[in-house]
Image (cartoon, coloured by chain):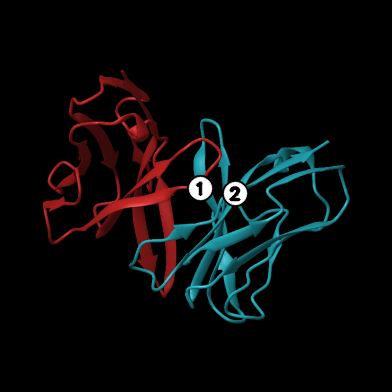
Chain colours: A cyan, B red
């Protein structure tokens, strides 16, 4: 089944404790992105990747890092999480920049 | 600027009726638009898309209309069913320099009443 898989689905952590949210897609897509969803603000792009080893900032990249060492994986790294990074995170992938993006099930992160 | 907005945050319709969800966008250079459905606890799910060289596209029970003159999109759902209850987002696909960014509207919560 074609899908985007995120892990974990839920995470509660403390301020400053590094964490990684994994994302994997099995559709051989070149394009992958991370979004965060907040009430009243909708979904906003954090980072995106056009291919292996090619990443760039989206609209809200502060406090986040990503890597794209393999085509299928695009982990989101929070080196020092803060409470304002409490949010619902979605990973997405697409075949090209002008085709529909497929989303993962989301990761609900709480930073206390 | 880049923004996509929805006219109504909530919409309630009777089961079996048709529903229309509206969306305005601001970037006149955008050439690809997507409607997503998001159910509680799930990620956005693709419903239908439309490119700027079209003004109408139909799927199974759904139709998207695009009016480039007034920068307006609508999603029509025919014969609504309880499973249609969800939040619906329009998204403006912005691509350039090989990058892709989806600019989402705030979403409309559709409730289907029995």
Q: Is residue B88 above or below residue B59?
A: above
Q: Is residue A52 above or below residue B31?
A: below
- Side of A69 where B75 appears, left or right: left
Q: Residue at x 83, y 36 (%)?
A: A112
SS under mark 2: loop
Instruction: Measure how far apart labels 1 and 2 are at the Cα level.
Output: 6 Å
On the image, the x and y values in percent for residue B36 come to 37, 46
Where is residue A30? Give x, y as percent: 48, 77
| Quarter of image, res A58 | bottom right
Which residue is at 68% across, 72% downward? A67
Check disc 1 and report its element: helix, strand or loop: loop
- Residue B30 seen in the current view: no
Q: Residues within 10 Å of mark 1 (few under 14, many from 20)?
A: many
Q: Which of these two is toward me, A77 or A93? A: A93
* Residue drawn at 18 percent across, 29 percent down: B18
- Quick check: marks 1 and 2 in contact, CB under 8 Å? yes
Q: Where A40 falls versus B50 (above or below)?
A: above
> Callout 1: residue from which chain?
B
Mark 1 — residue?
B43
Local packing at callout 2 (Cα closer than 10 Å; few below 14, some 14-19, many 20+) is many
The x and y percentages for residue B107 are: 40, 35
User: Is A48 on the left or on the right of A75, as rendered?
Assistant: left
Toward the viewer: B70 or B57? B57
Q: Quadrant of the C terminus of chain B?
A: top left
Q: Is residue B38 left or right of residue A34?
A: left
Answer with the quarter of the image where residue A110 lies. top right
Residue A91 location in percent, x, y? Answer: 56, 58
Q: Which residue is mark 2?
A: A106
Say if labels 1 and 2 share a chain.
Answer: no
Rendered residue at 15%/51% (across/down): B58
């Amino acid at each position: 089944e074609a899908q985007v898989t995120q892990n974990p689905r839920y995470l509660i952590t403390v301020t400053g404790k590094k964490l990684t949210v994994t994302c994997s897609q099995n559709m051989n897509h070149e394009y992958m992105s991370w979004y965060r969803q907040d009430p009243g603000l909708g979904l906003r792009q954090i980072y995106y990747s056009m291919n292996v080893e090619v990443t760039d900032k989206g609209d809200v990249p502060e406090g986040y890092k990503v890597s794209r060492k393999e085509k299928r994986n695009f982990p989101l790294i929070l080196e020092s999480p803060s409470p304002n990074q409490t949010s619902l995170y979605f990973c997405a992938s697409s075949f090209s920049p002008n085709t529909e993006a497929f989303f993962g099930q989301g990761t609900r992160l709480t930073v206390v | 600027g880049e923004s996509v907005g929805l006219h109504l945050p909530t919409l309630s319709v009777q089961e079996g009726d048709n529903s229309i969800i509206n969306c305005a966008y601001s970037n006149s250079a955008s050439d690809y638009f997507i409607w997503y459905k998001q159910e509680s606890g799930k990620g956005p799910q693709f419903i239908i898309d439309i490119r700027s060289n079209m003004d109408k596209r139909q799927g199974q029970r759904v139709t998207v209309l695009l009016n480039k003159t007034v920068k307006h999109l609508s999603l029509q759902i025919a014969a609504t069913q309880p499973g249609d209850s969800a939040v619906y987002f329009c998204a403006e696909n912005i691509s350039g320099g090989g990058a892709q960014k989806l600019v989402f509207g705030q979403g409309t919560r559709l409730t289907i009443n029995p």
